[in-house]
Amino acid sequence: MTATARRRGAAALLDHWHRADGVRREWLDVGLGTASADRATAERILSRLYRRLGREGPRFVWVDSPAAALPHTTGIPGHDDLHAWLRPSPPPGRPPVAVDIAASWSRLLAALDEAAGHPDLEAPRQVRKGDKPPPELPPVAALEAGVPLRVVLRRGVRDALRTALMEDVALPVRAALAPPSRLPVCWYGQQDASWIAHHDALRRLGLSQPAPRDAAHLDDWATLARASGWWWPGEEVCVVVERPARIGAGVVVYRDGSRLPAQRVSG
């Protein structure tokens, strides 16, 4: 490869990163958004998710905080129950809809990972057995040091948003509600943005080509994240939480006035 070609290749990788960082910022705004939920859109997408799994569309119960949701979640499995259903020898009978959603979500992630096969994502040189993991560097410095774009995007988009939205907001709120073993399985709506943003960026940058069905499924999850807060899927009732009224340093304030702890929100 000539010096000119190397410079062009490096410039292309930097351009990929700068565009991906714009997607990250967009999804950070979604994850920290406090505008009212788009209830009609959220219900439409959730109903389609149920029907995709061969279920009837649920009745919806909207509440103003996660704490207010819990009295309506009787019968929704906890995390231990979920893991039991996902083992090679699950319990007899039809699984709860939350289990089907979790399995479908896991399959989608695997398919989206498989679809991200663009050559620009790979290392500029062949990685040999015994090589050390790529160094933890800021994105631009990492690319200049030869860290694969795939790793830079995973760290700079997915992992950064997971820290800002899950570790700093959703997980502290969940921990304040009850021990994990006592909480029914839920999804986090706007704060599910980390994995959505990662695959959204890959697709927008032309680095991923998911199958049409998988692309449509990703679009549904993205639309749902833009439309709602947390949600608990039951067999007949889906409980959905309005977005918070405020997300600040150390606290999340919900529309019913309840306040739950968060870490310092990072960007």
Image: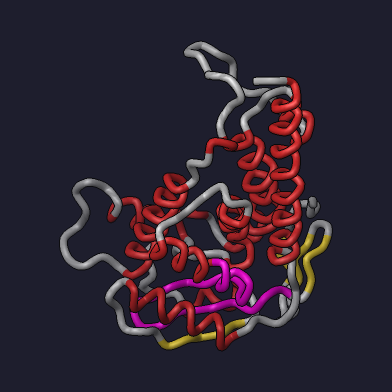
Measured as percent of width and height from the top left, residue 193 is found at: 62, 59
Measured as percent of width and height from the top left, residue 247 is found at: 78, 66
Whether the magenta-drawn stretch holds residue 231 is answered as yes
Q: Magenta part of the protein: which range?
A: 222-244
- Taking the view exactly as shown, the residue that stands out farthest to the left is 92
Q: How is the image coloured?
A: secondary structure
Image position of 102 (left or right of 223): left
Quarter of the image where one finds residue 78:
bottom left
Q: Is residue 76 above or below residue 267?
A: below
Residue at 46 percent of width and 46 percent of height: 113
Measured as percent of width and height from the top left, residue 61 is found at: 51, 86
Whether the magenta-drawn stretch holds residue 223 is answered as yes
Measured as percent of width and height from the top left, residue 149 is found at: 63, 35
Quarter of the image where one finds residue 67:
bottom right
In the rendered image, the quadrant that contains the N terminus is: top right
Q: Is residue 117 above or below residue 257?
A: above
